Amino acid sequence: MGYLMPTLSGITYEELPGSGKFTYNPDGGHQGERLFLVDWDDRKAFHEALLGWTEPVGDLSVRYRGQRFPGYDYLYCRNVTVEGLGELSQGADMASYPKAKVTATYTSGNLGTSTADTDEDYDEDEEAGLAHLTEEWDFSGEFLMLPDGSYCWSLDLELVEGSVGLSIGTADIALTSDAEPLLRRDLIAAALNTVNSRVWYGFGIGHVLFLGAAARRTTTSDGVSAWEITYRFRARTQSYNEMYRPGVGWSAIEGTTTGDPLYAPFDFYNLFA
């Protein structure tokens, strides 16, 4: 019975001796390495299939994830080196070879943090769409001055004269995608200064404010210009649509004529669709 050659994205390949190397060190973490042999003319398509890519489909960005290291689902192909093997043929533009040796290095991808707080709220497709994002968290506090009459002295229950300061917990969240084909300027503008309409990284509705985004052009592995986009949010322990009311505590506020909340709700998942 003949041996069926393996394929990746329809490209036939062989593995070379030494393929499957696996290492670990405290600084770089886990790392895998595989050595492939492909036809020279297939080298570009093969390395793109290893690394994955993102492409625009209508108004959406569709991400095709890179190849995983077998047995370690958290290791993704991040780097590729291509070398020619066999007799060199000098062409008009550059040399060519019969075969290409492709060295693929696999490092840890983002495991992702669920934005939902219960199984009922969890959406597998939406969560998977955020798994490629790099997360940065900065926990701190925000100092607020409360209205007069918000507190009284415990000893005799007399009102405290003047305003009382209160610090509430905050978290600045930055989510970065390093290779997006589209910059949704209109969507980002629409989301500015809105609050989450759904649970977002464990924070309840109205507790996360979208501060905006920073974007710059980068170059992907296949030489195409792409966008590196960082989205910034600030979460806090109290809703942005509540203020401290003397004698009552934290209470929702709304416009006197419109009845609208101070900050409009927005589904933040739409920023990453």
Image (tube, rainbow, N blue to C red):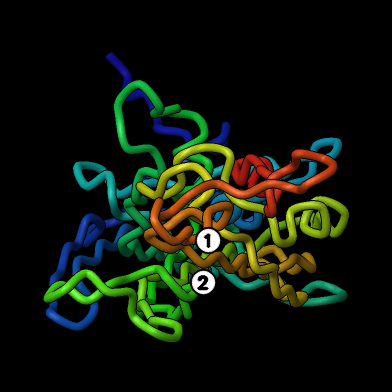
Q: Residues within 10 Å of mark 1 (few under 14, many from 20)?
A: many
Verify CB contact (< 8 Å) between mark 1 and mark 2. Answer: yes
Q: Amino acid at mark 1?
A: Ala
The residue that disc 1 covers is 100
The residue that disc 2 covers is 83
Image: 223 above or below 181: below
Quadrant of the image containing the C terminus: top right
- Circle nearer the N terminus (1, 2): 2
- Identify which residue is drawn at 43% across, 66% down: 135
Q: Is residue 55 left or right of residue 233?
A: right
Identify which residue, 127 or 243, lies in the foreground. 243
Residue 112 percent location from the top left of the image: 36, 51
Q: Residue 246 shows which numbered tag?
A: none
Residue 239 percent location from the top left of the image: 48, 53
Q: Amino acid at mark 2?
A: Glu
Structural distance between the alpha carbons of marks 1 and 2? 6 Å
Q: Is residue 185 left or right of residue 248?
A: right
Q: Is residue 256 left or right of residue 161?
A: right
Image: 219 above or below 120: below
Provide the secondary structure element on which disc 2 rests. strand
